[in-house]
Amino acid sequence: MTNKERTLSRDVEAVQIPSGSHITLPSGARVTITQVLGGSYTVMTDSGLARIAGQNGDALGEQVTPDDAPTATVTETVPEPEAVWEQLRTVYDPEIPVNIVDLGLVYSMEISKRDEGGHQVDVAMTLTAPGCGMGPVIAEDAKTRLLLVPGISAADVRIVWDPPWNQSMISEEGKMKLGLI
């Protein structure tokens, strides 16, 4: 994507990168969209990078798609593991143009039946660096996406540090996107 300069049409909530702090970008602020992946916008501001959620794309002059809010309804539908993995592939670190699965950040995914009905998905993932303040934001994004999978009524995404992440964990596709091969 080519960087697009924009002026915010209204105040907009954002997450500062890499600290993960919640901030408000003021109406009239000039920003440059540097990346649009996984339904969110990474923008360069006067004070650094920030992530704007997709539902606030209108403040950037972008077309907003209907809200994909999780329904978390209890159904007896058995979730398809591939559907879970596909949802995880829609989650991105806002600084890296590769999804968390292809980056090798997802260590495990387990689906279990809940006593109260429906199914739970448990994910263990890591980050590229232990000090990344975006970890909770990325984990929450993953959880929200997992609740969109039919049959999933609960999700838990844990950040773990063992084993430590390294570049050899990146998939071939991810390495190609990053220009590593």
Image (spheres, rainbow, N blue to C red):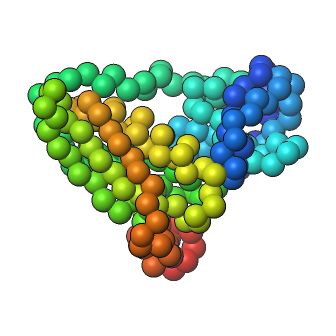
Question: In the displayed structure, does residue 36 sit left or right of residue 88?
Answer: right
Q: Residue placed at 42% from the left, 35% from the top?
A: 144
Front residue of this view, candidates 176 and 46: 46
Image position of 104 with respect to 47: above or below: below
Q: How many marks?
A: 0
Question: In the displayed structure, does residue 138 sit left or right of residue 29?
Answer: left
Q: Whole-percent x and y of residue 105?
A: 44, 62
Q: Is residue 85 visible in this depiction of the protein? A: no
Q: Is residue 32 visible in this depiction of the protein? A: yes
Q: Whole-percent x and y of residue 64?
A: 57, 24
Q: Whole-percent x and y of residue 52?
A: 65, 35
Q: Residue placed at 69% from the left, 35% from the top?
A: 22
Image position of 42 with respect to 167: above or below: above
Q: Residue placed at 17% from the left, 44% from the top?
A: 112
Front residue of this view, candidates 112 and 50: 112
Q: Residue placed at 70% from the left, 50% from the top?
A: 19
Question: In the displayed structure, does residue 41 sit left or right of residue 39?
Answer: right
Q: Whole-percent x and y of residue 21?
A: 70, 41
Image position of 23 with respect to 37: above or below: above
Question: In the displayed structure, does residue 76 sit left or right of residue 62?
Answer: left
Front residue of this view, candidates 94 and 34: 94
